[in-house]
Image (cartoon, coloured by chain):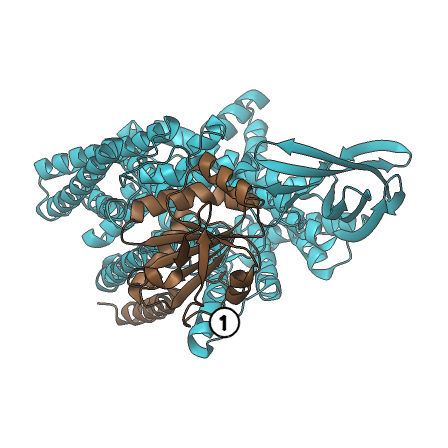
Chain colours: A cyan, B brown
Amino acid sequence: MIASLGRILILASLLAAAAGAILGFAAGRTRSADGLKWARRFAYLYSALIVGAALIMVYALLIHDFSVSYVAQVGSRSVPTWVTVVSLWSSLEGSILFWGMVMGLYIAAATFLTRGRYAEYQPDAIGVWLACAAFFSFLIAGPANPFHTVPNPPLDGPGPNPLLQNHILMAIHPPFLYLGYVGFVIPFGFACAALLKGRLGHNVLKPLRESLMLPWIFQSVAIMLGGWWAYEVLGWGGYWAWDPVENASLLPWLTATAALHSIMVVERRGILKGWTITLIQATFLLVILGTFMTRSGVFNSVHSFTQSAIGPTILGFLAAALLFTIALLAFRIDKLESEGRIEGAGSREAMFLLNNLIFVLLTFTVLIGTVFPLVVEAVKGKQMSVGRPYFDSMTVPLGALLLFLLGVGPALPWGRATKEQIKKALIPPVAGAVVFAALGYVLGVRAPWTLLTLAFGGYAAYVTLAQMFVPMFQRMKSGESLGTALIDGQLRRGRRRFASYIVHAAAVLAIIAIAVSSSNRQQLELHFTKGQTQQAGGYDVTFLGVEQRQEPHRLSTVGVFNVMQGGKQVARLEPNMNQYQMMREPIGTPDVHTTALRDFYISLSNVDARAETASITVFIAPMVVWIWLAVIAMAVGALFGLIPAMRRGVIPSAARDPLPGAAETA
Amino acid sequence: MNRTVLLVGVIIAAVLVGVLFMGLGKNPAEIRSPLIGKAAPTFALRQVGTTNTIDISQFRGKPLVVNFWATWCGPCWEEHPVLVANARMLQPNVQFLGVVFQDQEDKILSFLAQRGSGYPTVVDEAGKTAIAYGVGGVPETYFIDADGVIVAKYNGPMNGDIIREHLQKVMRQ
């Protein structure tokens, strides 16, 4: 019953999306207002149907209707309700349904928010969105159907993967990732529409930029949450392993970040139009690639689902989307008229271009490292993997260079600049570089790359803070009160500019925290008998004993440790080993004591409950918490810049009248 | 038309899609068993709770899923409902067979009585069959095609996706 209803909704959503796509493209050709109106209606209809199908699945999960195949696969009467709801995206078919739902929400929101405007681009954009939506509905209707009817339903199911039940972050990380991933379809639609029209007008830059920014925010947070989860749960003391699927989430983020910057150059100077469009399209293509990587079983990863007909189907879609995009670019890119050119190497737009080249280089570096094992296996028939040394040696210098540009770029003026101006802009921030590097050296940083990162970071911090507050001080000098200068100059009129420097400041913090935490990390292996105390990097660690805790779904063996520093109690840490009924091998969960300065992290490598002995790995890493906080600050900053822009967007006249200084940075 | 864009785009796309296409159908986590592609070792074992003997050769002609398990194994408890549900869903096209080893008859019977069974279960009393199949731990599952050839092996508890994926391999043979 529920299974049939779900199936009908999916099939109807496929029809609605296909019809809407055809109508959208037709309206784009004929400029028919009625055609556009109907395309919009079909977009809303599609959204309602796919969201309805997903909600029906949630309902089936909640009432434990095991006659629905997906519920029989992942449902269980014995797990808490939040786990049941989260099960929607815990397995292959459900995750694709959830993907469809997010897509429905995005398409409905984008169609609604751009209604009555951008008439030149909207029909084709809707066409592209719904064409992508039609593919995913087809996937859910066919290869990934979660609504099969089970003829003799079981009384209970196995429940979702225990790793997903292990930590609350696992309930948050996937939705954020989908909100990031799927959302990139919206700017992709606008970019394709611009190419179809052969014109990237100034008016469409606003929806293009905003629809790119929102998923970028979600994607940033999702990547951070994934790293944080790995750090808190997996027990190897790190947060990023260059796992193929981690890379898959990073790739579109890199190109999207590049596009967010190059779009500013289009806004300001009317150049780099084709380049920006290519980046936006590459972002969505990399999203499909990432979906393929997680859903095909081709890559070995904690994220992999097993293989099925879904892999080849997504690969077919990727191939089709690539062909469409390449053909569109080849035929139309020369039509996008350039309104100017880059004025000299010392200008801000030149720095933007350099920044973009580095982001693209990073994208290729990560992409090649990720697919290289497949090439080797295809050519030589040998299994291999590309590890951290490759990725680190390639990305650390590029990352440092980006940080350098993050300082130099905003310091330089737009357009042609005299030598004198350049000198005046570039020399004072050296003070910031010296201060940061010296501070790092005094605090024990010795690794050359980290010291260089600190110097670049100090330079960038100086420039960023100056750019952030100089306009305010100028206003105050010209007689405005602090209140007006702050509220009007920073928070109201200069909001987008101010927000983008918040993102920059947070990015500087994130890069410094990553560099310092990884180069100044201590790792110790210690063996304890009960009651024993040992030294670990300035801390005294005492092993208090072993506790065993029987929980419904697992048996936890907990090692209890007391951590003291200078005779003062610092923390009581309880890393544990969990034997899940579902797993053949136990899963360790570390315990971390986090402070603003450093993390003290204990991971159990071996514990014997009878003999009361334990072997542990201790990691002491500075500044780790600042990575998470910095990414949150980046997201909040970007959101802050987006909110007023959205509100302004309701009044079309204001949108056509960019505010002074609004287009300063991304 | 911009030929450079076309050329560069087509090269990148062709290489990428080609490499990914070649990677399809491989499971990087799978451990290869030397028995894959060979005839499944034959056995005739007593069905639990009866004196009947079940001979593996009687299932020739349709795909067979042989699942080694035991009541003392936690993952097997979790896997059991998945197996039962799939056996029900896939009958009569696919045959499932449980092989219990290192276990006690009464425990097996009460386990099956409590948790249900949708397919025959036999007892590998001396553990010889498990050795013949190279079973390293429970649960382990062998996927055998209609001609009695082992197509795939899976270590550890399975979910519906895994069962389906392996059966697809069997069907493809």
Residue at 55%, 23% in the rendered image:
A480
Q: Chain of mark 1?
A: B
Question: Which residue in the structure is indicated by mark 1?
Answer: B34
Looking at the image, which is closer to me, A325 or B143? B143
Lateral position of residue A280 relative to residue A116, left or right:
right
Q: Kindly give the residue lying farthest to the front in the view shown.
A: B51
Residue A30 in view (yes/no): yes
Q: Nearer the viewer, residue A30 or A648?
A: A30
Percent position of residue B124, x then y? 52, 56
Residue A117 appears in the rendering = no
Q: Secondary structure at mark 1?
A: loop
Q: At label 1, which amino acid type do we have?
A: Pro
Residue shown at 52%/66% (left/top)?
Answer: B132
x and y percent of residue B125 in the render? 55, 55
The percent position of residue A69, horizontal first and vertical second, equals: 32, 40
Tell me the quarter of the picture where residue A176 sits. Answer: top left
Work out which quarter of the rendered image holds the C terminus of chain B and state it. bottom left
Above or below, A160 against B53 in this view is above
> Nearest the camera: A118 or A85?
A85
